[in-house]
Amino acid sequence: MKDKLLYEGKAKQVFTVEGEENLLVLSYKNDATAFNGEKKEEFKGKGRYNNLISAKVFEYLHQNGVKSHFKEALNETEQLVEKTTIIPLEVVVRNVAAGSIVRRIGVEEKTNFTPSLVEFFYKKDELGDPLINDAHALLLTDAKEEELVQIKEMALKVNEVLQNLFKEVNLELVDFKLEFGRNASGDIVLSDEVSPDTCRLWDIETGEKMDKDVFREDLGDLMTVYENILTRLEALK
Ligand code: ADP
Ligand code: UDP
């Protein structure tokens, strides 16, 4: 099935698929990185958790009308996706203040954002993924103005759907990062992953952090937390 290694990133390997120009295999690695790659550690089982969690999330998004690259989980660490040309934006949605926005604009952590905020970061490791505005996004990507509007609408729809999903398993969706890409038909579809690496999730009852912040801030055993998220999602019918 999988053929040549096309790209190796910090969290995944991307493979071509034999005889299928429009498909890719994403292979989830056990590496965790933070602070633009400065902090790095390997966690046994992480690739499996993120692959299975992301697959569950994309299946749920599909059931709720969100168009994405996701086809199917192939095994414990790999999934089949539609090949897209990634628009180099990290689209961040925030419901509650945490992370970089607290440092950037001085809002207090845990401030509620109503309506939710959508931010664009330019996906460029060498620059440390800077925050950009719409004019910058038009300059730096091939997305048209109406496509930026569409991307923001899709990001807010994903937020609505995932707030419901995570609420069902007692988790508050604090914030998350999405990537969008253009498929062979030219349509913009949700791509990449949605996992505890790319979302902030807080336990609704205890307020505990249940995401990559456990690694960023050395709060405990990251794999126990990721296993807990997968178990909660698997318990849903
Ligand atoms: P990074 O490149 O930030 O280190 P990863 O290790 O997660 O991230 O690598 C996965 C790469 O695959 C990312 O660059 C991501 O943009 C890209 N990608 C995700 N989904 C698709 C897709 N459907 N088609 C093409 N590329 C994709
Ligand atoms: N995020 C991500 N990849 C990045 C940057 C951020 O998945 O390269 C996610 C992060 O996990 C959080 C949200 O996007 O859920 C907002 O992150 P923030 O801007 O607060 O950045 P931080 O400095 O905390 O990484």
Image (cartoon, rainbow, N blue to C red):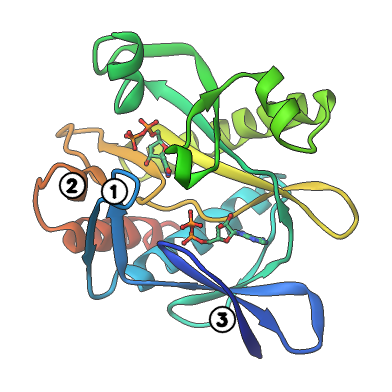
Label 1 beta carbon within 8 A of ligand 2: yes
Say whether residue 211 is left or right of residue 199: left
Q: Is residue 167 above or below residue 211?
A: above
Amino acid bearing label 3: Leu
Say which of marks 3 and 1 sits in front. 1
The answer, for residue 153, to whether it is visible in the render is no
Say which of marks 2 and 3 sits in front. 2
Q: Which residue is mark 2?
A: 214
The front one of 120 and 235 is 120
Say whether residue 7 is left or right of residue 141: left
Q: Quadrant of the N terminus?
A: bottom right
Q: Tell me residue 6's x, y (percent).
A: 62, 75
Q: Tell me residue 182's x, y (percent).
A: 78, 50
Q: Is residue 18 above or below residue 190?
A: below
Picture quadrant of residue 72: bottom right
Marks 2 and 3 in Cβ contact (< 8 Å)? no
Q: Which residue is mark 3?
A: 74
Label 1, residues with CA under 10 Å away: few <14, some 14-19, many ≥20: some
The residue depicted at 28 percent of the width and 18 percent of the height is: 103
The alpha-carbon separation of the residues under discs 2 and 3 comes to 28 Å
The residue depicted at 69 percent of the width and 53 percent of the height is: 68
